Image (tube, grey):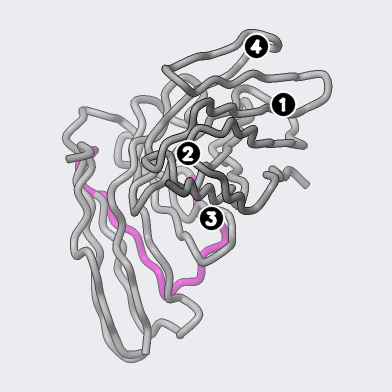
Amino acid sequence: EDKVVQSPLSLVVHEGDTVTLNCSYEVTNFRSLLWYKQEKKAPTFLFMLTSSGIEKKSGRLSSILDKKELFSILNITATQTGDSAVYLCAVTPYNNNDMRFGAGTRLTVKP
Amino acid sequence: ETGVTQTPRHLVMGMTNKKSLKCEQHLGHNAMYWYKQSAKKPLELMFVYNFKEQTENNSVPSRFSPECPNSSHLFLHLHTLQPEDSALYLCASSQDLGQGNSPLHFGNGTRLTVT
């Protein structure tokens, strides 16, 4: 059965720290992996990854995919309190509407 | 404003009530989705519509009934719900089906409490 596992489930850091969030998956006919940030209600899109080894970067956030080992990481450098949120990983297969989400990692950044 | 608007924001209903959740997207997208988000569980896909035609019903109980009159509007009709149906119900849209090339755009959700 397809599944997406995120770790850790929760993480507490202080401002300025660097964090790495993990997402591993088992999906038939993998097409893409996406990261979302959910602060209060609506998850907002961060990155879409389809190819191994190509880093996507946006400001202090970056992400990379390893299709051989079936995982992705999301890095956040110099964390700020505004980075506090639940980070969701989702995987989409080909020819299938079913996008599998992980349970999320709850990140808390303390001042 | 996320481009996807959901109403109401909060809903408390009894087990015998009938209510409806509404979603509207202003992005010109072709696909719309209903997701259920329960505490400490992954987002669960409930229904998918593509060009207002239902393409997915993920084994959802019949007490949840979706309706998609056009590509911009999506409803979720609720009837005789159970307390375990209490959750955040998220509507989303995407340009194309399946998020393979286009990410989901989510609304702020409806926080549903069934008493």
The residue that mark 2 highlights is: A15
Residue found 73% across the figure and 36% down from its top: A25
Quarter of the picture holding the C terminus of chain B: bottom left
Q: Do labels 3 and 4 share a chain?
A: no
Q: What element carries label 3?
A: strand
Q: With respect to residue A44, does B42 lie above or below?
A: below
Residue type (three-letter) at the residue carrying disc 1: Asn
Judge by depth and name the residue closer to the eye, B9 or B93: B9
Which residue is found at the position 59% from the left and 29% from the top?
A74
Outermost residue toward the top? A54
**Residue corresponding to mark 1:** A29
Amino acid identity at mark 3? Glu
Question: Circle 3 is placed at which residue position?
Answer: B44
What amino acid does circle 2 point to?
A: Glu
**Which label belongs to residue A51?**
4
Q: Which chain carries label 2?
A: A
Closer to the eye: label 3 or 2: 2
Residue at 32% over, 68% down: B111
Is the same chain shared between marks 3 and 1? no
Residue A50 in the magenta stretch? The answer is: no
Mark pair 4, 1: CA separation: 14 Å
Where does the magenta region start and end?
Answer: B56-73
Residue B68 image position (x, y, % from top left): 27, 50
Quadrant housing residue B53: top left
Dot in front, 1 or 2: 2
